[in-house]
Image (cartoon, helix red, strand yellow):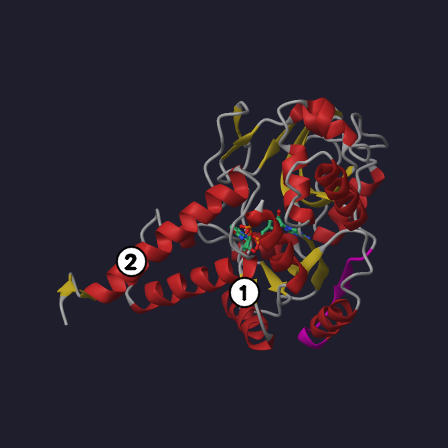
Amino acid sequence: AAEVEGVPVGALERHAELAELAEEANWRYYVLDTPTVSDGEYDAWMRELRELEEAHLSLRTPDSPTQKVGAPISSDFTPVQHPRRLESLDNAFNDADLAGWQARAERLLEADPGPYLCELKIDGLAIDLVYEKGRLVRGATRGDGRVGDDVTANVRTIKNIPHRLTGDGIPDRLEVRGEVYLSVEGFHKLNEQLVAAGKPPFANPRNSGAGSLRQKDPRITAQRDLSMICHGVGVWEGGSPRPEAQSAIYERLGAFGLPVADTYKVVESLTEINDFIEYYREHRHDPVYEIDGVVVKVDRIEAQRQLGSTSRAPRWAIAFKYPPEEVNTKLLDIQVGV
Ligand code: NAD
């Protein structure tokens, strides 16, 4: 068969086709907040892209969708450079993927990577907050990881995001990462209102949350019942030193008045990680927000530092994804029909 620099033309063409589909989907999902394919379909494209690149390494160029985070930002907001790059997460879809992640971490560290922090993967919108001397000075979306949309005015309308931090040892400069979401109940209510007003409904809570935060008029954002949960930090300068474990960082953030989940758990072994994953597979709908999986993180910050990151995701964390649920696709059909 015909080849270009050792890559069969068929593989080359399929790669180009999938890359274009993924770029288009990214634009609709991240910038327009109105996806036209299901997450399951998108994930299948990305899996095929990764497999093609695994087989033909020259296809893995820096501009491949497999190497990037999110999508370039829209022109509706002022672009802001993040103090530290925001990343995505690598995915595990089964026990073997998870065990593979753990084994790689163990090999790289030449030690047991545990303990691990298990937490829920909120299907929301990533946000980066900057506090200076305890005052909220900026909120920005993830964008492509380096540059995001400035949504400070909108973020200020979110009730559980403090405008001022409280307590002792507040850093001079603190960057907090988290997820902004609309509760499942809030999503249904909003869709009822939209339909009653003759407007198209959102496909799922994730898109309704993202669409509500990325409004040009913050007064509209203020009417939507958005919340936030913290899941990481970037810059931490001055004040009391940054704690040495992810779980201890969450405790500090909570003490500063920031919203942290009460569902995370620190465990020692792969078996216990699997128990957490199985528990929430059964109790997926217990939280007020939608979850699409569980995030497992190496708890010790020193081990995180040693493991580092790939071009788009940390090696010290993994997202275990549950299979997508039917309901999303059905709602998507309705929306596409509008
Ligand atoms: P991701 O959603 O797989 O995971 C990374 C994100 O998870 C982080 O940026 C963070 O914001 C979030 N997160 C939630 N809870 C977290 C926690 N406890 N700790 C750390 N992070 C947490 O990756 P992504 O790059 O944001 O998006 C890719 C996914 O988005 C795809 O797998 C697909 O499901 C969906 N997507 C769908 C379409 C579509 O057209 N349907 C297009 C693009 C992306």
Q: Are marks 1 and 2 in contact (CB under 8 Å)?
A: no
User: Dot 1: few (<14), some (14–19), or many (≥20) neighbours within 10 Å?
Assistant: some
Query: Disc 2 designates what residue?
Result: 59
Across and down, in percent, residue 10 comes to: 23, 66
Q: Quadrant of the N terminus?
A: bottom left
In-front residue for pair 239/249: 249
Going by the numbered disc 1, the residue's amino acid type is: Leu
| Residue 270 falls within the magenta-colored stretch | yes
Disc 1 element: helix
| Rendered image: mark on residue 283 | none
Across and down, in percent, residue 269 comes to: 70, 73
Residue shown at 32%/56% (left/top)?
Answer: 17
Residue shown at 81%/48% (left/top)?
Answer: 185
The Cα–Cα distance between marks 1 and 2, rounded to whole angstroms, is 29 Å
Is residue 67 left or right of 219 when viewed as pictured? Answer: left
Is residue 137 left or right of 303 when viewed as pictured? Answer: right
User: Dot 2: few (<14), some (14–19), or many (≥20) neighbours within 10 Å?
Assistant: some
Against 228, residue 313 (above or below) is below
Against 227, residue 3 (above or below) is below
Span highlighted in magenta in the image: 263-271
Query: Disc 1 designates what residue?
Result: 109
Q: Quadrant of the C terminus?
A: top right
In-front residue for pair 282/327: 327
Is residue 85 visible from the viewing direction of this image? no
* Pointer 2 residue Cβ closer than 8 Å to ligand 1: no
